[in-house]
Image (cartoon, rainbow, N blue to C red):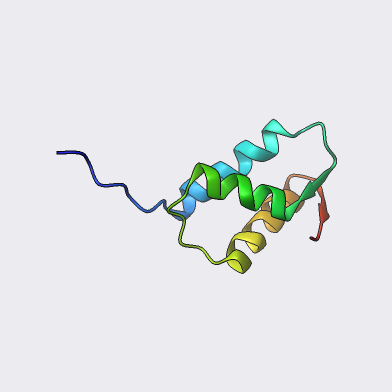
């Protein structure tokens, strides 16, 4: 019997965001919608709203020294 897919934890979502930021370290500006789409592709069962995910992305990106493209 196949294992049931689990909803990602907030820690899983943060890891996916940081992974995306690291992969794009050469770009000084991060698009919130681009990162949001990437996270949703990596974690399709993410239950955060778009606003919650965008807020988490923004806080993580600013903490890492990125500028934000608010799109």
Number of marks = 0
- Residue 57 coordinates in the image, percent (x, y): 66, 54
- Residue shown at the point (76%, 33%) measured from the top left: 25
Q: Decide if residue 58 is on the left or right side of residue 19.
A: right
25 in relation to 33, above or below: above
- Residue 47 coordinates in the image, percent (x, y): 46, 61
- Residue shown at the point (59%, 60%) measured from the top left: 53
Name the one closer to the observer, 51 or 37: 37
Residue 29 falls in image quadrant: top right
- Screen quadrant of the C terminus: bottom right
Residue 1 falls in image quadrant: top left
Q: Decide if residue 46 is on the left or right side of residue 26.
A: left
Q: Decide if residue 47 is on the left or right side of residue 55.
A: left
- Residue shown at the point (66%, 63%) measured from the top left: 55
Can you name the residue that lies furthest to the left here?
1
54 in relation to 4, above or below: below
- Residue 7 coordinates in the image, percent (x, y): 37, 53
68 in relation to 1, above or below: below
- Residue shown at the point (52%, 50%) measured from the top left: 13
- Residue 54 coordinates in the image, percent (x, y): 66, 61
């Amino acid at each position: 019997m196949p294992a049931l897919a689990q909803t990602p934890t907030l820690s899983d979502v943060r890891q996916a965001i940081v992974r995306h930021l690291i992969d794009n370290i050469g770009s000084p500006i991060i698009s919130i919608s681009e990162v949001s789409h990437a996270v949703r592709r990596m974690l399709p069962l993410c239950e955060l709203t778009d606003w919650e995910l965008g807020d988490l992305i923004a806080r993580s990106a600013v903490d890492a020294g990125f500028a934000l493209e608010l799109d």
